Image (tube, rainbow, N blue to C red):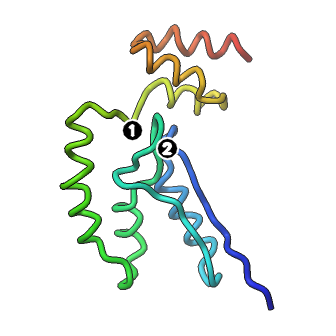
């Protein structure tokens, strides 16, 4: 019998990437090969992705070691964030997610450093 890998990758626009990854892990329990995409500290464009450190803690599999992940976070991710690299929770990404729209508007709003969230939402609603 041939086997196939089943994979999952989610974005965190609605702050649900970890929950969706948990659900995928539970739904695919018993399958031989699954892949759940995650990134260090949830790094990814805009709102980011599921964070590796959260996912490993949830999976509680002895073959996964959290120690090197934490060391990597301390050595590389913390300095990166301190240098000004930005990702993570972002209101424009949340609003494009809630209105089921492509995040291109959120990308532009973030670059423009917009904080007029109500106007941004009204603009998104006008696009419908």
Identify the residue at the far right of this view.
Answer: 1
Q: Is residue 57 above or below residue 99?
A: below
Of residues 16 and 36, the one drawn nearer to the viewer in this rendering: 36
**Secondary-structure class at tag 1:** loop
Locate the N terminus by quadrant: bottom right
Residue 56 image point, x, y percent: 38, 69
Q: Which residue lies under the disc numbered 2?
A: 12
Q: Which residue lies under the disc numbered 1?
A: 88
Q: Are marks 1 and 2 in contact (CB under 8 Å)?
A: yes
Residue 113 image point, x, y percent: 39, 15
Q: Which mark is residue 58?
A: none
Quarter of the view holding residue 32: bottom right
Residue 57 image point, x, y percent: 34, 69
**Marks 1/2: CA–CA distance:** 8 Å
Residue 52 image point, x, y percent: 39, 61
Neighbour class for label 2 at 10 Å: few (<14), some, many (≥20)?
many
Of residues 55 and 82, the one drawn nearer to the viewer in this rendering: 82
Q: Is residue 117 above or below residue 24?
A: above
Q: Is residue 54 above or below residue 121?
A: below
Name which residue lies at 46% across and 58% down.
Answer: 38
Q: How many marks?
A: 2
Name which residue lies at 46% across and 14% down.
Answer: 117
Of residues 21 and 85, the one drawn nearer to the viewer in this rendering: 85
Q: Earlier in the sequence, mark 1 or mark 2?
A: 2
**Secondary-structure class at tag 2:** loop
């Amino acid at each position: 019998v041939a086997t196939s890998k089943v994979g999952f990758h989610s974005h965190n626009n609605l702050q649900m990437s970890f929950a969706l990854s948990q659900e995928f892990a539970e739904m695919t329990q018993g399958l031989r090969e699954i892949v759940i995409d995650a990134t260090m500290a949830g790094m990814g464009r805009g709102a980011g992705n599921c964070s590796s450190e959260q996912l490993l803690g949830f999976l509680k599999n002895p073959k996964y070691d959290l120690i090197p992940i934490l060391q990597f976070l301390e050595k590389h991710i913390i300095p990166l964030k301190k240098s000004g690299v930005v990702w993570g929770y972002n209101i424009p990404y949340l609003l494009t997610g809630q209105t089921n729209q492509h995040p291109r508007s959120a990308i532009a709003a973030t670059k423009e450093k917009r904080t007029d969230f109500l106007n941004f939402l009204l603009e998104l609603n006008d696009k419908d």
